Image (cartoon, coloured by chain):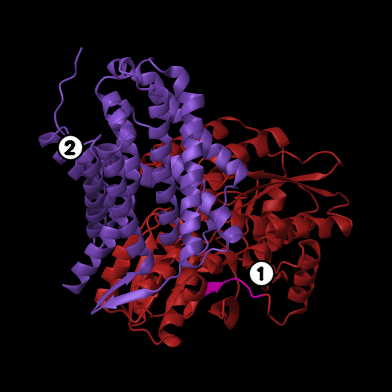
Amino acid sequence: MTELLQQLLNGLSLGAIYALIALGYTMVYGVLRFINFAHSDVFMVGAYFGFYLAPRVGAGGIGGGLLVLLGAMAGCAVLGMVIEKLAYRPLRGRSTLTVLITAIGVSLLLQNVGQKVFGANPKAFPHIFPETQLHFGGLTISSNQIIVLVVTLLLLGGLHWVVNRTRMGTAMRALSFNATAASLVGINNDRVISFTFALGSALAGAGGILYAMNYPSIDPLMGTLPGLKAFVAAVLGGIGNLPGAALGGLLIGLVETLVSGTKASTFRDAIAFAILILILMFRPAGLLGKMRVEKV
Amino acid sequence: MNLPTPFRRREFLTSVSLAAVLLAGCKDSGGGGTGGTGAIKVGEFASLTGSEAAFGNSSHNGTVLAVEEINKAGGVLGRQIELITEDNQSKQGESVTIVKKFISRDEVAAVLGEVASGRSLEAAPVCQESKIPMVSPSSTNPKVTDTGDYIFRVCFIDPFQGGLLADFAKRTLKAKKVAILSDVSAPYSVGLAEFFQKAFVAGGGEIIIEQKYASKDKDFRAQLTAIKASGPDAIFVPGYYTEAGLIVAQARQLGITLPVFGGDGWEAPELIQIAGPALENTFYSTHYSPEADDPMVKAFVKAYQAKYDGQTPDAMAALGYDSALVLADAMKRAGSTDPAKVRDALAATKDFPCVTGKTTLDGRRNATKSAVIITVKDGKFKYLETIQP
């Protein structure tokens, strides 16, 4: 029983990171109907921002740690806006496929520039928050895992508030319904899209830091696998739906951990993805997604 | 988008390397670099970047130092050795291309490389087909030299390492029940786990649980939680340092204070950077210790530190150094760089003094030599004991 509870705890903290990355995927999709495949590499850059920032701000305490987290988020937000401006804006109005392939190109570019600039060798990520282990009976949880859960919840709440309660959020939703109509009523589409990318990339940056805190070995290709899992999580929850992305991330994390703990550990990814296929067979729009009729 | 799916890529690359072998077989280039009086070309393929870069660079540094010393002493057969180095980025598939280039374009007399068994296994068939001697410094999987009679190595092999680790677990750690956590995507790890299990069970021990992971995994809490619940006396992690560091750190986070031990794949300064204080009560077996009391080791450590800003050479550096020495010695005894003669001379290597101990190449072209156990104390690697074959 203790073992099962411990595995659930492990799965929850892994799932929270997937959820955080998935939020970025799903938000950009919700507004632009386009999957930003470079998201997982912005996530990687976020971890490297933390790696270089931590010794400079003297991280290790709560304040320094928060500074690193916010710094990485800000850095990634800027990176996201630059990517949008240089790579995606010139393609505004072209077919989704063109933009999708450009996103793949940006992803490869970031990976390879990362290998050149940061070096291809894995680096040890510094401790940016004070670390302790908490014990409840036979259960153990590290403070880092709790930080991940708390930050994910806070960001999910914050995002929900931005999208549903602010003027910018209203503009984002308007844009996602009908971009032409939105610009007719005076919304500056370029600004809203730029903001969406900044927000999504800031989430990726936070994800990168939290991931590196828990798995302190970072390399320029580290985004690939968690990025893919998070994308799957976003689809599973219903892409475009914020709580759905969080739910999907937690589910993938839990399934993976529960499978890993058994004899079938090598089939971890196979089983996780088989579950995804099953769910999508019965709910093609994802767990919380709504079926929407494509207008022609 | 990036498609990581390692299995699909591996299958694809296997077929590529098979194709490469066939291609190499069609060309009857025989052996190159035999004629002339210029420098003797030796090709070295190494993981200078990527996940095993720490190993690759150490090994490369050792090889470069050895070649420099040999050349300073007048070279081999009155000719200098020219070392041509190529980086395979720790990626599967690259080594085949590199070795084919060495043989067809550079016309090397012999090939040196590499640390990771998986990539030596890719390159070996190419060398065997072209009949160019290949000396691996530190690939410990037995299959590497089974490829053919042109493939040699200067390190001990996994059955020996698995056996001595089983002995160590029983004798020094007093473990009766051991949990194994191995990397299914690395032939090195799978092989070592298997040989350890065989030897440990034969010695009366019990493998209580076997858990698996794949290279590049970062989260091992699920496997470790299952291991903790099974109640072992010690945990055997026959993987590489990148994952081993994370595994040890996460094990300690989960409150597992048991001894954790592994093979020579653990040896890298990065291990300490990644896992830090969590490494207390961990052990690994390796090929040599810089603290050993041997004049040759002392001279080597001194020369290495002078050349590389005071870095202490690790086992990979020592084996990289030895691989070049053994090859040069064979060329000297062969009196020629003709690949067939060098091969015969390599096969006849007996009690050749090396930094990692007296090296004899046996009938299966593997080295028999002693091993040492290293432990971690106060964030530093510490020599524990030497085990004779």
Amino acid under label 2?
Gly
In which chain is the residue bearing label 1? B
Where, by quadrant of the figure, is residue A16 drawn? Answer: bottom left
Q: Position of residue A127 (x, y in %)?
A: 50, 65
Looking at the picture, tell me which residue is in the foreground, B133 or B118. Answer: B118
Direction left: furthest residue: A282
Direction top: furthest residue: A296
Q: Disc 1 to disc 2, how far (Cα)?
A: 62 Å
Residue B18, label in figure? none
Q: Position of residue A150 (x, y in %)?
A: 31, 59
Disc 2 secondary structure class: loop
Mark 1, Cα crowd under 10 Å, few <14 / some 14-19 / many 20+, is many
Q: Is residue B372 above or below residue A18?
A: below
Disc 1 secondary structure class: loop
Relative to A85, B380 lies left or right: right
Q: Which residue: 23% across, 46% down?
A: A248
Looking at the picture, tell me which residue is in the foreground, B15 or B146. Answer: B15
In which chain is the residue bearing label 2? A
- Chain A color in figure: purple
Amino acid under label 1?
Thr
Residue A236 within the magenta-colored segment of the rendering: no
The magenta segment is B284-289
Where, by quadrant of the figure, is residue B291 drawn? Answer: bottom right
Q: Which quadrant is the N terminus of chain A positioned in?
A: bottom left
Residue B20 seen anywhere in this rendered image of the structure = no
Q: Which residue: 57% across, 45% down?
A: B89
Q: Same chain for marks 1 and 2?
A: no
Residue A286, label in figure? 2
Residue behind mark 1: B359
Among the chains pictured, the one given red colouring is B
Q: Position of residue A169 (x, y in %)?
A: 30, 34
